[in-house]
Image (cartoon, coloured by chain):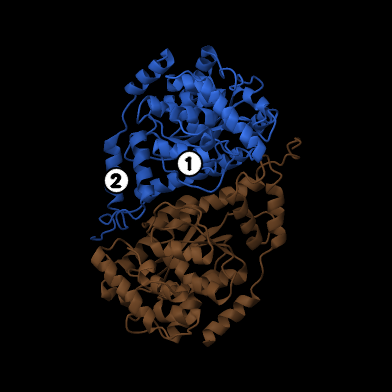
Chain colours: A brown, B blue
Amino acid sequence: MSSVDEELVRLLREAPAPDERSRRAVADRAAQVLRPAGALARLDEVCGWLAAWQRTERPSVEHPAAIVFVADHGVATEGVSAYPSEVTPAMLHALREGAATAAAMARVVGAELHAIDVGTGRPTGNIVREPAMDPERFARCFEAGRSAVAGLTCDLLVLGEMGIGNTTPAAAVAGTLFGGPAEEWTGRGTGVDDATWARKVAVVEAARSRVPSGAGPMEILRDVGGAELVAIAGAALEARLRSIPILLDGFVVTAAVAPLEVAVAGSLDHCIAGHRSPEPGHALLLSKLGKEPLIELGMRLGEASGALAALPLVRLAVAAVLDVATFEEFGLSR
Amino acid sequence: MSSVDEELVRLLREAPAPDERSRRAVADRAAQVLRPAGALARLDEVCGWLAAWQRTERPSVEHPAAIVFVADHGVATEGVSAYPSEVTPAMLHALREGAATAAAMARVVGAELHAIDVGTGRPTGNIVREPAMDPERFARCFEAGRSAVAGLTCDLLVLGEMGIGNTTPAAAVAGTLFGGPAEEWTGRGTGVDDATWARKVAVVEAARSRVPSGAGPMEILRDVGGAELVAIAGAALEARLRSIPILLDGFVVTAAVAPLEVAVAGSLDHCIAGHRSPEPGHALLLSKLGKEPLIELGMRLGEASGALAALPLVRLAVAAVLDVATFEEFGLSR
């Protein structure tokens, strides 16, 4: 195992366990409020999950933050996307100016939005024939993700991404981590045609076949991933160490954090899947990770949009436990 | 056909068509904003739907309102619920005092909540052996629903219900309107055991077998429905006449409005299904009505809770079209 993989395992093993006492306190209250026990099903669990990771019996979503990591990909030159790489810095600008979809959605849900450039105009290696990045760049990107989270004060973290071509490295990472036909991990991304999809499958297969057998999950991420994927993995690790709950966005984000779960089972317990996108690899990956998303509306944008759409459900889950009277408080017997 | 059915058909035929020009304007803008066309899928459609019924190119969800109609049911004496009828007025009180689940959720999403009593302590007839109500009570309940909506100023209406035992009349109404085995329309409601479920199926079958063949949808609703179901049908009609978009809650609400669609196809085009509950009859009924819900989280409370959980998605759908820059506005070519 590489030293980065060993270091990841060490950090993950030292990470704090969730606060099960707070989770139980929420479950107890949820069973006592003015409704049939279990009637809100998943929402009660979400409130308990939030309590466990915020380490309080009174969880809240008052200061959510979204980080969108942005980067370019050498593999874009293989013609795997419907858009040119020039779109990446333009969207970074649009995210920062508040003009992009995720920015508009963040305003609605009251989340602060940070768009962090980890590689626009500095594309990674073309993963068909070379590693996406060397160990030094990997370390810088991973650290960029960690410090982005370390510098935040938030009660719920949304992770998102933007980078033309990035569903290709996402498919390569997920496909290498979990195996299975490249076709099953490869989707239409922003909307490619049949010929482009077939080329994309071949690219994913070629990238995967380059990865040395026995490579650890961090090595896989470095080899066939991308700069924003690495930063997202770093952000998810830092959040895990700080016990900050995360709402994951779509396929790219889920593929980026999957190496943590492969390294140490349970490492993504602080993460909920915000949504399930139509990318076939996303559904497959979520099932591998045992994550059931909150919503499924055919969204396939990225940028954190799917997770931001799900965020109000977390807030509602909290209110439905903490702000509803118990039978006793309301003077009723069950 | 009964005179109430004839009157309903007449009103529905006079109802305004949706404003397709505004829907198209939204679709046009959605195709020009800074993302791949169609990337938000359903959310773009939701924004267009809202525009069509609000009759504006700039729809909004600034003043949403939720109405929860509350009533008791004679059929509760058949032991079809896990709870006694005394819970109904208590929950009416809790809704009004802000202590109930829907009240807490309404506060989070910024919706005003109205809990309207159309029959607590005055149970309808036991539908196993007699009509739920006579034509006079039907007319009063229907009118109560209509005036509740007529008295509102809102840009989005949420319909909900509370009434111990009311998944039984809901199953009876839906099963009579659409046919098929009573078992398929009958679920666990607030959580009944196997023996109670079997009794509930028999009750639904008995109620349905009483309905004269050839009865129109309004007659069916009067015969085997309930007071809050009738009020909800009236509310949905009034909203249709006023072109007010509706978010439907769960099985009971959907069963209550289904007679409108049966009377005149398209009469529920102003309604979106907020969620799909685990009641088997709800999924079946939504498929009969051609409605795909926004969320599915296992919620089975009623009170409007499922629709309130979905409401932020409508608001996000609007922002994702109106508050995102177009390529042109942002100075980019496609």
Badge 2 sits on which subunit? B
- CA separation in Å, label 2 and label 1: 29 Å
Residue drawn at point x = 29 percent, y = 38 percent: B22
Relative to A90, residue A234 above or below:
below
Residue drawn at point x = 61 percent, y = 32 percent: B200
Query: Would you call the spot at circle 2 few (<14 residues within 10 Å), some (14-19), or many (20 or more)?
Result: many
Relative to B59, residue B173 above or below:
above
> Where's residue A285, x and y in %?
46, 66
Q: Compare residues B173 and B39 and report the one nearer the observer.
A: B173
The quarter of the rendered structure image containing the C terminus of chain A is: top right
Q: Secondary structure at mark 2?
A: helix
The image shows a total of numbered marks equal to: 2
Residue drawn at point x = 76 percent, y = 40 percent: A328
The answer to whether residue A22 is left or right of residue A147 is: right
Residues marked 2 and 1, same chain: yes
Q: Name which residue type carries label 1.
A: Ala
> Where's residue A28, x and y in %?
72, 50
Can I make out residue A307 in this image?
yes
> Where's residue A61, x and y in %?
58, 54
Q: Which of the labelled discs sits on residue B175, or is there none? A: none
Can I make out residue B242 in this image?
no
Relative to B145, residue B289 above or below:
below
Whether tag 2 and tag 1 are in contact, CB under 8 A, the answer is: no
Q: Compare residues B216 and A149 and report the one nearer the observer.
A: B216
Residue drawn at point x = 34 percent, y = 81 percent: A125
| Corner quadrant of residue B83 | top right
Q: Name which residue type carries label 2.
A: Ala
Q: Which of the labelled discs sits on residue B27, or is there none? A: 2
Badge 1 sits on which subunit? B
> Where's residue B185, x and y in %?
52, 35
Q: Which residue is mark 1?
A: B283
